[in-house]
Amino acid sequence: MEYLDQFVLDQLNFGDGIIAYIAIFILAAAPMIKVFMIIPVAIAAGLDPLGTAISSFLGTLFPLYICLLIYSKIPSLSEKLTLNTLRNRSGYIKEAINIWNSYGVPGISLVAPLFLGTNTAAMLALGFGAQAKNIAAWMCLSLVLWILIITILSCYGCGKFLGYLG
């Protein structure tokens, strides 16, 4: 995790102006990098919190909508990905099934950015039979909520931390 944070910081330090926000967009779109890692590092690197939040939101949302679009356009994919084929999977998917059974689309959407990733959670929700419109709306709302929380905490935390240093 430290190596990943250092990589993100290096990418942001080389960026200047719009290039830094494009880097945030690309890093947020990468499935292995979570948005809660990008925002604090970018804000600590001195980037504008609002620009960082918008770039990370769009970067996370873009691949989500691509996944939903692909799923809706390929009927054979929707036939293969059903609840019955997902039952014998890893612990993360079993946990997602438990969340789904308890809370549905809103529940899985609210925990997705932190634990599962938005793309994985969206595919699971589609496999559970949810409509793409509902998934898109709830994931969008969830991302706005989490990015807002993470941005505020990062701004407050970085300000406090820098205040202790100076």
Image (cartoon, rainbow, N blue to C red):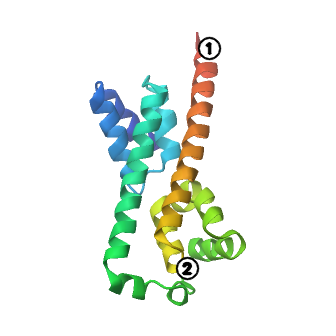
* Quadrant, the C terminus: top right
Measured as percent of width and height from the top left, residue 162 is found at: 57, 17
Return the residue nearer the eye: 78 or 30: 78
Return the residue nearer the eye: 75 or 149: 75
* Amino acid bearing label 1: Gly
Q: Are marks 1 and 2 in contact (CB under 8 Å)?
A: no
* Amino acid bearing label 2: Phe
How many numbered marks appear? 2
* Element type where label 1 sits in the image: helix
Residue 83 sits in quarter = bottom right
- Residue drawn at 50 percent across, 73 percent down: 131
Measured as percent of width and height from the top left, residue 165 is found at: 59, 14
Residue 42 sits in quarter = top left
Return the residue nearer the eye: 40 or 151: 151
Q: Is residue 119 above or below residue 127?
A: above
Instruction: Decide if residue 41 is in sight here.
Output: yes
How far apart, in angstroms, are the residues tagged by discs 1 and 2? Answer: 48 Å
Measured as percent of width and height from the top left, residue 35 is found at: 48, 46
Mark in the foreground, 1 or 2: 2
- Residue drawn at 40 percent across, 34 percent down: 9
Asked whether, in this view, residue 128 is left or right of residue 12, the answer is right
Q: Is residue 115 above or below residue 152?
A: below
Measured as percent of width and height from the top left, residue 132 is found at: 47, 69
Instruction: Decide if residue 28 is in sight here.
Output: no
Return the residue nearer the eye: 73 or 98: 73
Where does label 1 land, which residue? Answer: 163
Q: Is residue 150 above or below residue 66?
A: above
Asked whether, in this view, residue 155 is left or right of residue 22, the answer is right
Residue 128: image tag = 2
Name of the residue lying farthest toward the right: 102
Asked whether, in this view, residue 146 is left or right of residue 82, the answer is right
